[in-house]
Amino acid sequence: MTKRLEVHPDIRQARRLDGAFYHEPELYSRALERIFARSWQWLGPTGEAPGPGEALPFTFLEGSLDEPLLLTWAEGGKMKLLSNACTHRGMLLCTGSHSQRHLRCPYHGRRFLLDGAFVSTPGFEGAEGFPSAEEDLPQLALEELDGHLFGAVDPAVGFKETAGSFRSISSFAPLGKMRENHRAAKVCELKANWALFVEDHLEGFHVPVVHSEPGGPANHAANRTELFPWSVLYVRIAAGADPVFWLPENHPDSGKRVAAFHWWIWPNLMLDLYPWGLSLIRVDPLGPARCRVTSRSFSDRPESTGAGAGSDLRGEELEDEEFVETVQRGVRSRLRRSGRYSPAHEAGVHAFHRMIAAAMAGSAE
Ligand code: FES
Ligand SMILES: [Fe+2]
């Protein structure tokens, strides 16, 4: 029987998401189809995308969905996100970057334009009702947000609903002008369910216990969590003389000494804005108790990364990774009942669990 996940809407009464979510293979498979195949995924900076007349193959959520896709840009057209599987027998059309007007299948020679339209195929004389629109390459949803590309296989909610709050509240940050610090890019694998990594990111509750804080202990009571339909914002107030944002007058936190805006966007993207720039983390599922963490860093003033919140990201990440892996061992204990939430500190985690429960039940649209 399939397990039903439920989380009470009132955090003061709710029990946490059932621990089975973090290790049962059946729930993991359901999460791939109901959460990951139906949500928006960060694909990378727009600067890494193909130029006009080019195609770039990649694997969407490698190690879980393993969907072979192509980013293409036909001359005089727009960038597209297409299936890379030939509509004849499924051969991958393109395995390295490509810069010709046509995509030509290496198996039996079917041709497509870079916008995915079927052009020709040898040997189909006599096939009835052929070609139909089904011979075109399937096209997926593609959006750009401030210099970053997002794609989705079959999104349950629109891109605006997913990332609109981030865009409106963080519009002061010049994301589109930031350059990547390639030396800070990192990919690592953890022995933990992807959702445990997200939960660690959704609360500042562990920060004074686990991390030594730059600038001395912060005033955690001043921090705040704001919930949106598909994202959560955690605003961290500066400790001591830490660098802070200059925020425009119409910003909801104008006049406050904000050291960091920690965004989480459904289901697996974390965007941490610091006065020096952006730390971006995507956590991908690799198995019920395995995930891959991709971290990238972008800045428009790289000289100012040395102080305040976010100045020792690598040290904090190592500490978080160790805790997340250890929690994985605890959540699967037969003796553990699902615990309660701290109403003061875990509103973001509770909201995340409610989203998981809705998506897993197929009622997240
Ligand atoms: S698989 Fe592409 S033409 Fe046959
Ligand atoms: Fe942490």
Image (cartoon, rainbow, N blue to C red):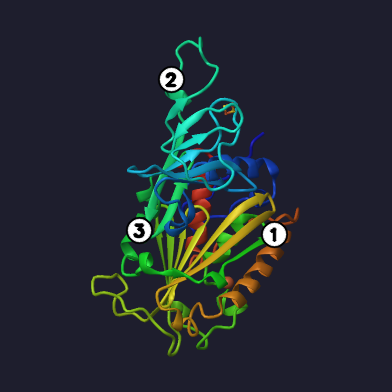
Residue at (36% x, 68% y) in the render: 177
**Residue type indicated by callout 1:** Gln
Image quadrant where residue 114 sits:
top left
Dot label at residue 165 = 3
Secondary structure found at label 1 = helix
Query: In the image, residue 293 lies at what x, y percent?
Result: 60, 61
Q: Nearer the viewer, residue 127 or 211?
A: 127
Q: Is residue 337 left or right of residue 167?
A: right
Relative to 327, say whether 299 is above or below.
Answer: below
The residue carrying mark 2 is 132
Left or right: 32, with 228 as reference point? right
Question: Does 183 sit left or right of 74 as displayed?
Answer: right
In this view of the protein, which residue sits in the foreground, 321 or 16? 321
The crowding category of the residue bearing disc 3, from other C-alpha atoms within 10 Å (few below 14, some 14 to 19, many at least 20), is many
Left or right, 355 with respect to 90, comes to left
Instruction: Identify residue type, mark 2.
Output: Ser
For residue 328, the mark is 1
Of all residues shown, which one is farthest toward the front? Answer: 100
Q: Are marks 3 and 2 in contact (CB under 8 Å)?
A: no
Earlier along the polypeptide chain: callout 1 or callout 2?
A: 2
Amino acid at pointer 3: Ser
